[in-house]
Image: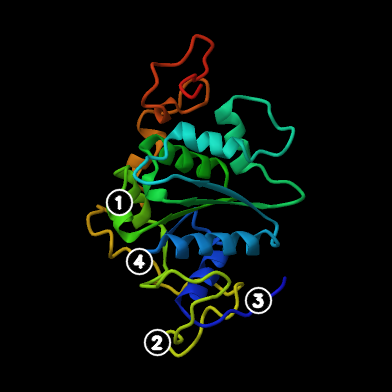
């Protein structure tokens, strides 16, 4: 495993934490940054770094104020399928992109800029997929304001339970340079190595999600999952597709087509 020396500063600290989180246990990681350029540079940098660590990178995005619908998300994912893997419908191909690993990679990292614009059905698809694909890690990048006013109300509940990495009050970085800055207040630069042990205990920032009710007593927010209505008879969760008119006669959900 190679080590890369990083300059001290908020950007390099966020980069190191994000790389470590890609190989940790959190299925969802929230990245907060006020400037689009800073967020995009961070996502591009982490994509380049983890590609050398047996990690497949998948990207998706939208342009605010447009919502990232389920259909748009699935089409972006399916477009990144391995060449020749064209079997199945749009949902099945997208699911394989996010869950299948092989000899080339043993981890999948999905990077979504403006993740706060995910529609409720798109967000639910990612939650269910992460449960069936334990090697999947989903990074939702957003502005602080966007995270506080997302398209899907469930986004707040999810983000309150996810690892949060903040870029801080940075100006948009110039191309090819990493913003500098003093080391953290603890006197140590915890971002020196990308393969560090990850954030310290208490590193989760839930304070900005004051409106969230938090998890239930069982330790999980059952509102996020399909246990309420149960899976459909054909083994697929049709609750994802709120816009659907119902399953087709052959037992498959045609809402995406």
Q: Which disc is residue 4 wearing?
A: 3
Q: Disc 3 vs disc 4: Cβ atoms closer than 8 Å?
A: no
Q: Which disc is residue 185 wearing?
A: 2
How packed is label 1: few (under 14 Cα within 10 Å), some, or many (20 or more)?
Answer: few
Q: Earlier in the sequence, mark 2 or mark 1?
A: 2
Q: Secondary structure at mark 1?
A: loop
Quarter of the picture holding the N terminus: bottom right
Q: Position of residue 10 (x, y in %)?
A: 45, 76
Residue 19, quarter of picture? bottom right
Residue 62, quarter of picture? top left
Q: Secondary structure at mark 4?
A: loop
Query: How far, Cα to Cα, is label 2 from label 4?
Result: 17 Å
Question: In the image shown, does 238 or 13 lie closer to the viewer?
Answer: 13
Residue carrying label 1: 217
Q: Position of residue 129 (x, y in %)?
A: 52, 40
Residue 151 seen in the current view = yes
Q: Position of residue 158 (x, y in %)?
A: 37, 50
Numbered disc in front, either 4 or 1: 4
Query: How far, Cα to Cα, is label 2 from label 3?
Result: 22 Å
Query: How far, Cα to Cα, is label 4 from label 1?
Result: 20 Å
Q: Disc 1 vs disc 3: Cβ atoms closer than 8 Å?
A: no
Does 126 appear above or below 146? Answer: above
Q: Earlier in the sequence, mark 3 or mark 4?
A: 3
Query: How far, Cα to Cα, is label 1 from label 3?
Result: 42 Å
Task: Please identify the residue farthest to the left as the structure is shown.
Answer: 211
Residue at (41% x, 28% y) in the render = 230
Residue carrying label 4: 205
Q: Disc 4 vs disc 1: Cβ atoms closer than 8 Å?
A: no
Query: How far, Cα to Cα, is label 2 from label 1?
Result: 35 Å
Q: Earlier in the sequence, mark 2 or mark 4?
A: 2
Q: Earlier in the sequence, mark 1 or mark 3?
A: 3
Numbered disc in front, either 2 or 1: 2
């Amino acid at each position: 495993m190679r080590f890369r020396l990083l300059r001290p500063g908020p950007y390099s600290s966020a980069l190191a934490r994000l790389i470590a989180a890609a190989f940790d246990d959190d299925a969802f990681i929230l990245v907060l940054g006020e400037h689009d350029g800073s967020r995009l540079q961070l996502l591009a940098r982490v994509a380049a770094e983890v590609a050398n660590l047996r990690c497949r990178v998948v990207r998706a995005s939208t342009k605010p104020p447009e919502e990232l619908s389920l259909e748009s998300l699935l089409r972006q994912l399916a477009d990144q399928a391995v060449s020749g893997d064209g079997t199945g419908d749009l949902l099945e191909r997208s699911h394989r992109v996010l869950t299948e690993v092989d000899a080339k990679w043993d981890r999948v990292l999905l990077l979504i800029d403006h993740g706060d614009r995910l529609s409720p059905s798109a967000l639910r698809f990612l939650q269910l997929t992460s449960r069936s694909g334990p090697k999947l890690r989903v990074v939702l990048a957003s502005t602080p304001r966007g995270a506080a006013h997302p398209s899907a109300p469930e986004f707040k509940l999810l983000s309150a339970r996810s690892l949060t990495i903040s870029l801080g009050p940075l100006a948009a970085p110039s191309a090819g340079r990493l913003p500098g800055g003093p080391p953290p207040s603890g006197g140590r630069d915890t971002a020196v190595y990308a393969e560090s042990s990850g954030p310290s205990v208490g590193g989760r920032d839930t304070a900005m999600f004051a409106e969230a009710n938090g998890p239930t007593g069982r330790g999980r927010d059952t509102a996020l999952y399909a246990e309420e209505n149960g899976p459909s008879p054909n083994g697929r969760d049709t609750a994802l597709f709120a816009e659907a008119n119902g399953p087709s006669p052959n037992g498959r959900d045609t809402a995406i087509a």
